[in-house]
Amino acid sequence: MIKSILLVWVSVITITFSAKAQTTAEYIAENVEYAQTLMREHKVPASVILAVAIHESASGTSKIARYLNNHFGIKGANSNTEIRSSYRDYPSVRESYDSFLEFLKSRSSFEALFAKYDQFDYRNWARGIQRGGYARSRTWASQIIGIIKRNDLTQYDERPDDYIEPAAPVVSSKSRSARKSTSAYTVKKGDSLNKIAKLKGTTASALMKKMD
């Protein structure tokens, strides 16, 4: 009896370890073909689709990926009884990929991306998805772009040999100084902390903390 219990325990540990041991390279190999199928249909770079899935599912090893087949962090109702989660569940990994494209195409905040960018412009797609509100993190797009570069995912975007990558936008020194000037304030005679706080849209206590 004890031997049987030990064998079951070892088997569970082995299965759990195997799920967690999946590498990013293995994840890409498993899902690249379908990512390319979606790219050809919707004109979203396969590199972006894969990178978002890698990021949001920890290359398929996250809890919601293992229990819910949710590889894109999309929230919604689920019927899973093994974990409590606010994320959607899917019958298969592919249906999670389908849902990601449906999510982008059904939201007005992403609508312009399909008309503006082609399937080769992964940088602008990543930045556009972030701007559209897909993620709260300000560094999300940079992380997606980093995953694409580290794993050479652009090789799956079927870029033409003569394709020229768009130049990254450059923030001019004038723009930077303009931003600085809008945040600065010159104290005038008769000003009070409460008056300055009201002008800057904050509170006197918050200003005092900045002055410490």
Image (cartoon, rainbow, N blue to C red):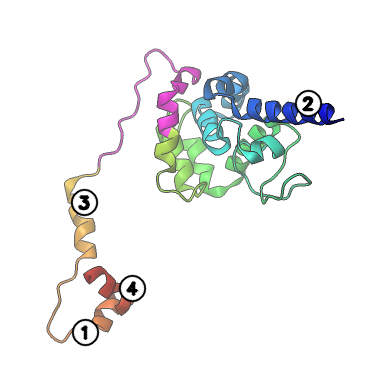
Q: Earlier in the sequence, mark 4 or mark 2?
A: 2
Q: Amino acid at mark 4?
A: Gly
Position above or below: 188 against 115? below
Q: Quadrant of residue 188?
A: bottom left
Judging by the rendered image, the residue that carries numbered circle 2 is 7
Q: Are marks 1 and 3 in contact (CB under 8 Å)?
A: no
Taking 192 as reference, is 58 above or below it?
above
119 horizontally vs 179: left or right: right
Q: Is residue 48 above or below residue 155?
A: below
Specify the amino acid type for callout 2: Leu
Tag in front: 4 or 1: 1
Query: Which of marks 3 and 1 precedes in the sequence?
Result: 3
Give the Cα separation between the discs numbered 4 and 2: 64 Å
Q: Which residues are magenta?
A: 145-170
Is 199 on the left-hand or right-hand side of 53? left
Q: CA distance from mark 2 to mark 1?
A: 74 Å
Whole-angstrom CA distance, mark 1 to mark 3, is: 28 Å
Q: Which residue carries the number 3 mark?
A: 176
Please tell me whether mark 2 sits on a helix, a strand or a loop: helix
Type of the residue with mark 3:
Arg
Q: Which residue is mark 1?
A: 192
